[in-house]
Image: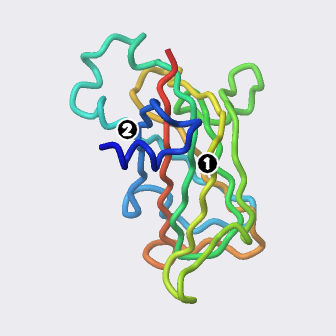
């Protein structure tokens, strides 16, 4: 265990991150033209089986997004946006629940051996989010900021991984 603790960056020592992962077969599967987006609500694993038996104040608990990683078939410029409710962006600024976002340039994507997936990573983030509708979900929007369109289905697979720190 000692070797594990030494391998953790000093600023993260003693902190427990919850890892949230989208599913390539269920989330972000549509084709996206430049600046087009897809909304997804990702269930927090601890709420998956008992989401409706937990009190609202527990399900609404805030998190700090510390890491965002993307695994993608295509090398594109991505933006990951966060919202407080599953209504996502609305046409009324008074009810819109936008919480924040992070952008990746296409140049941020790295590929090993010139083949396979492109990997994007942002660590050390400080983006606070919460579940305002108490559904036990993280409400994310993925936006394609590239001139090149994101392909649909198996040729345009994208997985978004989050490292969340509970905020007390």
The crowd level at tag 2 (other Cα within 10 Å; few <14, some 14-19, many 20+) is: some
> Residue lying farthest left?
49
Query: In which quarter of the view is residue 9 placed?
Result: top right
> Residue lying farthest bottom?
114
Where is mark 2, residue-wise? 43
Q: Residue visible at 75% across and 19% down?
A: 94
Q: Is residue 11 left or right of residue 55?
A: right
Q: Residue visible at 54% across and 24% down?
A: 130
Asked whether 1 or 147 is in front, the reply is 1
Nearer-N-terminus badge (1/2)? 2
| Residue 45 position within the rendered picture, expressed as x and y whole percent measured from the top left | 31, 37
Q: Residue visible at 52% across and 27% down?
A: 63
Which label belongs to residue 12? none
Q: Is residue 64 left or right of residue 154?
A: right
| Residue 52 position within the rendered picture, expressed as x and y whole percent measured from the top left | 28, 20
Q: Residue visible at 65% across and 40% down?
A: 125
Where is mark 1, residue-wise? 123
| Residue 17 position within the rendered picture, expressed as x and y whole percent measured from the top left | 44, 37
């Amino acid at each position: 265990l000692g070797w594990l603790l030494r391998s953790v960056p000093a600023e993260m020592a003693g902190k427990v991150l919850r890892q949230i992962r989208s599913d390539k077969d269920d989330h972000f599967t549509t084709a996206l033209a430049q600046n087009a987006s897809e909304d997804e609500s990702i269930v927090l694993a601890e709420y998956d089986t008992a989401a409706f038996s937990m009190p609202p104040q527990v399900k609404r608990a805030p998190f700090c997004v510390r890491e965002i990683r993307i695994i993608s078939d295509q090398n594109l410029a991505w933006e990951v946006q966060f919202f407080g409710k599953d209504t996502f962006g609305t046409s009324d600024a008074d009810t819109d629940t936008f919480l924040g976002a992070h952008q990746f340039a296409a140049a941020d994507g790295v590929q090993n051996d010139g083949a396979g997936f492109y990997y994007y990573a942002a660590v050390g983030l400080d983006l606070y989010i919460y579940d305002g509708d108490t559904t036990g979900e993280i409400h994310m929007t993925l936006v394609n900021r590239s001139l090149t369109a994101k392909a649909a289905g198996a040729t345009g697979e994208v997985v978004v991984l989050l490292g969340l720190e509970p905020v007390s």
